[in-house]
Amino acid sequence: METTFRLARFAGTHLRVPIRTALLPLLSLLLIAALLLAVGIGAVAVPPRTVVAILLDRLGITLDVAVTQQQQAILWVIRLPRVLMGGLVGAGLAVAGALLQGVFRNPLADPGLIGVSSGAALGAVAVIVIGFAPLGIFTLPVVAFIGGTCTTLLVYHLSQRNGRTDIASMLLIGLALNALAGAGTGLLTYLADEPQLRSIVFWTMGGLNGVLWEMTLGAAPCILLALLLAPLLSRPLNLFALGEAEARHLGVEVEQVKRRAVLLAALATGAAVATAGPIGFVGLIVPHIIRLVAGPDHRLLLPACALTGATLLMLADLLARTIAAPAEVPVGLITAFAGGPFFLALILRARRQYGWS
């Protein structure tokens, strides 16, 4: 009875019906608005009406709007793949953060904890320094994805004991392997020459410049697969909040949920980091924002995180390429400047609320 009461209170009192029914439609509208703004604003402005006309024309629907070939080329060749990639990266990182926070039962959990970001960075820096590129421009993202995935699998394997995954061990092993990967990245950076150093620094700051349709379409299946499968873990992650023992007594296959959540987080984060570089704070901050608005129910949290993460990274990338035009600021710096103060404000708010010393 006690467990049932706690579960009912957890699942029911944090979500008000008006918020639950209106949040996802509102976030969807905001995402569409961000998409139109992001593809329309730049050195050559493309009005929203013209953007809609160009997009519908590809679907065989013609609007009575004057469209130039320059506008079509700018939107389809340059801006649209970049903006869509930004949306996918933001959604993937946000959902990965929500999954790991649910599994670790820790609001400070971040996709970087499982080693995927540091492993991807090590692979990318190795490609830049060694200069071996059998796949051309796709060598770096492919090797980065492989590096992130292998690091995550190693963290998961080392954290298992007697057929069970210990969350505390996973956290500590992830920190240790992050340090080792960081040391390897530092060594390669030390050995790099000046042009390679410039490439390394720019990649590690995170950015979406130079994204092509091939890169977007290559990363999309991994991120979309993680986004589609993540909601299937909503109910067990809700029960995880009660503790692993309680969740197991309520019929949750705890080890299977851990495995799936970590693998989905690694899949989404690996594809995102491989294409855009390490972009911080999205996976940490976005789940916090949604919990403040709508509560901790993962049935709403996960899709809302996907929509919010996509919207925020689209807008951050728009700011990154216009704030210092014609120069371009790495989008990772924008998210750090925005996320750092927000996270600090959350900590101070929690300290006042709970009386932390």
Image (cartoon, grey):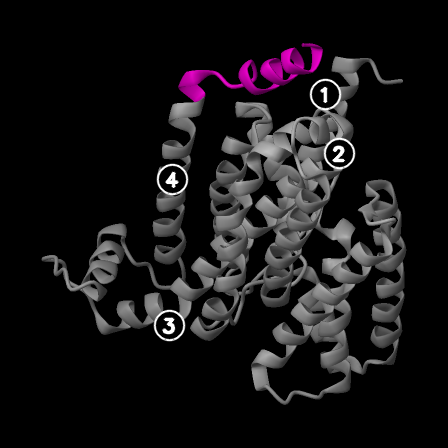
Quadrant containing the N terminus is: top right
Q: Quadrant of residue 105?
A: top right
Q: Amino acid at mark 4?
A: Ser
Residue range corresponding to the magenta coloring: 1-19
Which residue in the protein does label 2 denote?
A: 106
Whole-number angstrom distance, CA of label 1 to CA of label 3:
45 Å
Which residue in the protein does label 1 denote?
A: 349
Whole-number angstrom distance, CA of label 3 to CA of label 2:
41 Å
- For discs 3 and 2, the disc positioned in front in the rendered view: 2
Residue shown at the point (51%, 59%) measured from the top left:
321
Residue shown at the point (73%, 44%) measured from the top left:
255
Q: Amino acid at mark 2?
A: Asn
Give the side of residue 165 with respect to residue 22, left or right: right
Note whether 279 is above or below 109 in the view shown.
below
Residue shown at the point (76%, 23%) measured from the top left:
348
Q: In the rendered structure, which disc, 3 or 2, sits on the residue that comes first in sequence?
A: 3
**Residue 298: x percent and y percent?**
56, 32
Q: In the rendered structure, which disc, 1 or 2, sits on the residue that comes first in sequence?
A: 2
Q: Mark on residue 285?
A: none
Which residue in the protein does label 3 denote?
A: 77
